[in-house]
Image (spheres, grey):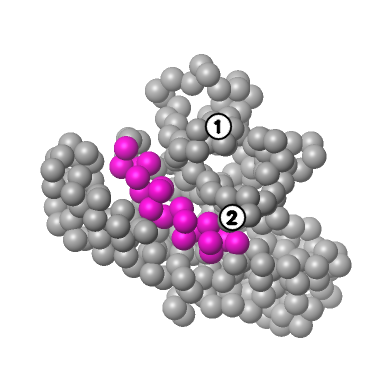
Amino acid sequence: MWIIALVIINMRLNLEPNFYPQRTQRMNDTGQYNQALLEAMSSLTSITTKSAFIEWTRNKLQPAFPHNAFAGWVGKLDAAEVLPFEVVCSNLPDEYIESIKTENGHYTTPLMKRWLHSGQPQLFELDKGSQEFDRIWLEAFKAADLRNTASYGAFDITGRYVTYFSFYRLQEPLGEWHQLQLKIIMPSMHSTLLVIRNQNINVEQASDRSPLTPREREVLVWICEGKTSDEIASILGISFKTVENHAQNVLEKLNVHNRAQAAAKAYQLKLVRVGPRLADI
């Protein structure tokens, strides 16, 4: 499906020079864009863990769909809210994530509601009008300096589960190209996140029995990937000091003395899942 869509984009680029003027100026060779998209989609088939998925968005998807931050959810739909099973995000402030979380643990935004109503990709730029949106959400969006967003979602074949992805701080003015791009990448991202969810069920049960908080478990995953505190801070969009505090809590709660021992114990207790890293694919 995404190969057919790639052909359509090529036709638009050739027949309509203004379809995406800034990108075509930067990528004079359309084949360069094609290659970036093909590499991103082909490498996605090997992703089975949240950490590898996040690295894929940063290293593989970035050349095809430039962005600075992203968030993804997989869960059940409840009215216009998502009851999440998995939350995957990169370089997104914790304060913003908490601001879109309801008292019952669901997630919702005005753009999510608009997508559910229309079924179409949603684009939003803060400086191009925002009167129709909730003031509290707008304030949180502005405080996080997200500037713009492109969002889209999908349902599984049974209609029971939904995935929803939002990309923020996109590098170029938003338009029809971004909507088409989301339609190309969404089916594969949707399938991958469902696979990750299914493979994490046993891990999730083990994690529920652990004394670690969700954020500590997230830091632990990256410790197991061999990331430094600086790298973890960059990936999660939090401060170096916050990462160090979480890491120290992990060591104390697992009753170990260093990060290598923490990683070994995490695998032993099945607090994290052994899976392919993007660098190994």
The residue positioned farthest toward the top in the image shown:
131
Which residue occupies 71% across, 40% down? 78
| Residue linked to disc 2 | 156
Q: Is residue 189 magenta?
A: yes
Which residues fall within the magenta stretch? 176-194
Quadrant containing the C terminus is bottom left
Q: Nearer the viewer, residue 218 or 239?
A: 218
* Residue type marked 2: Asp
Which residue occupies 51% across, 70% down? 47
- In the rendered structure, the answer to whether residue 125 lies left or right of residue 253 reads left
The residue positioned farthest toward the front in the image shown:
158
Helix, strand or loop status at disc 1: helix
Helix, strand or loop status at disc 2: loop
* Residue type marked 1: His
Q: Is residue 257 magenta?
A: no
The CA span between labels 1 and 2 is: 17 Å
- In the rendered structure, the answer to whether residue 238 lies left or right of residue 85 reads left
Percent from the top left, x then y, of residue 13?
A: 18, 46
Percent from the top left, x then y, of residue 153?
A: 53, 46
Quadrant containing the N terminus is bottom left
Which residue occupies 14% across, 52% down? 28
In the displayed structure, 136 sits above or below 182; it is above
Q: Residues within 10 Å of mark 1 (few under 14, many from 20)?
A: few
Percent from the top left, x then y, of residue 159?
A: 63, 50
Residue 117 is labelled as 1
Q: Main secondary structure of the magenta part?
A: helix
Number of marks in the rendered image:
2
Figure quadrant of residue 22 = top left
- In the rendered structure, the answer to whether residue 71 lies left or right of residue 149 reads right
Which residue occupies 56% across, 26% down? 138
Earlier-in-chain disc, 1 versus 2:
1
| Residue 109 seen in the current view | yes
